[in-house]
Amino acid sequence: MRRTSAFVLIGTVLAGLATACGGSGSSGDGKGSSGSPVSIMVSGTLSSPNLSYPQAATGALAAAEAINKAGGIDGRPIKVIECNDQLNPSTALACVRKAAQERVVAMVGGIDLFTAQLWPVLKTAGIPWVGLDVISADQATNEMSYPMTGGTVTGFYQAGRLAVQKGGKQVVIIRHQNSQSAFVADVVTGGVKAAGGSVTSRIVSTIGNPDPTPAAAQAVAKRPGGIACACNAGDGARILKAVRQAGFTGAFTAGYPTLLESDIKTLGTLADNTYTPSDIAYSGDPKAALFYDQMRAYDPKAATDSISAGSWLATYAIAQVLKGQTPLTSATLIKRLKTVPAIDTHGVTGGSLTFSKPGALPQYPRIVDPYVIEYQATGGKRVPISQKFVSVYSGS
């Protein structure tokens, strides 16, 4: 789904491991916690020329700072180690090997295109990945994966439902050429079928194409009731503009991150009748105030989305389930994650989480958060259709 497929990367490692993992240290001011640190690593593509998600690190740092000020984990501060894979599979592998050397209790959050290659190393080291933003099938099925939100799965599954409910039973999917987008298109198809619709065509639009007019024309020519975009941010706005200019006025759907607030504002009325489900609570929800307040306090410019929420939630979940436990190791963490009946998500998701049983969608057993907030664009603004979470499994 993202800018570059793991299978078409060309070149060598852009920088050594010392550079990739240069941002390490204990977050917070140390007040309230003074014991030996409990280390976690935030990895994935934090920065690269084609793709950057620095908010993954910000979410973990903001949470760790607050937890450390409150006493850490039984007096031990959380140390956040940042390791940027630079959108390079060799560097991603170096990051997880570094995590094993540093004896971190968990990998935390992030967007990572290369996890299929990384799970064997993590399995051998016994290190779980908590709060990873799911963008591929392996991340939704691997036993070492503990997603804290529904990620791509719930957002785009519901986008498929809404394409039928707000548009019509015949749906066209526009996707990119890489494996991540193919996965997302499969998720959308599941939502379309759950709503009683069918996908009549999957049309490919090249990633980063400044002129997606041909793909848009193909989609509109199919005369669909709805068009779902299994695509990136940036590309999503261009594709939406192209299908509207091609005469399509029906429902256009995508996951929340596909269209930025600035995109919707710029498109104005062209974005009307566009629906983007999100897997986290809206910013005005008082139940989720802790997340939004701590993110703003740590970095007012950081994105507050499912990516930053995943790493923030993961850090809080680790502190919660390890409290009162000994030893504070990855093995203890995994044991607790598998057995704790309710992990508090502080209102960020639709309810508490548990990994004691698989999620309700059998093809994505690691997705245990089934809830989304539905948004509609109107008059250049994105507003929640309802301020209540909706279950993607039941559609209500």
Image: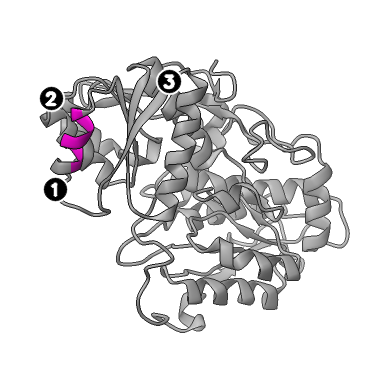
> Where does the image place residue 199, in percent across and percent down from the top left?
38, 29
Numbered range of the magenta stretch: 215-221
- Magenta-drawn stretch, dominant element (helix, strand or loop): helix
Image quadrant assignment for residue 276:
top left
Three-letter residue code for mark 2:
Gly
> Where does the image place residue 375, in percent across and percent down from the top left?
38, 24
Determine which residue is flagged by label 2: 247
Q: Residues within 10 Å of mark 2 (few under 14, many from 20)?
A: few
- SS under mark 2: loop
- SS under mark 1: loop
State the separation of the CA atoms marked 2 and 3: 22 Å
Three-letter residue code for mark 3:
Gly
Mark 2–mark 3 contact, CB under 8 Å? Answer: no
Q: Is residue 220 magenta?
A: yes
Q: Residue at x 48, y 71 (%)?
A: 89
Determine which residue is flagged by label 1: 211
Mark 1–mark 3 contact, CB under 8 Å? Answer: no
Tell me: 135 left or right of 319: left
Q: Residue at x 40, y 15 (%)?
A: 165
- Between residues 170 and 259, which one lies in front from this camera angle? 170
Mark 1 and mark 3 lie on one chain; the one further toward the N terminus is: 3
Q: Is residue 3 magenta?
A: no
Mark 2 and mark 3 lie on one chain; the one further toward the N terminus is: 3
Looking at the image, residue 140 lies above or below residue 68: above
- Between residues 373 and 58, which one lies in front from this camera angle? 373
State the separation of the CA atoms marked 1 and 2: 16 Å
> Where does the image place residue 90, in percent across and percent down from the top left?
49, 77
Q: Residues within 10 Å of mark 1 (few under 14, many from 20)?
A: some
Determine which residue is flagged by label 3: 197
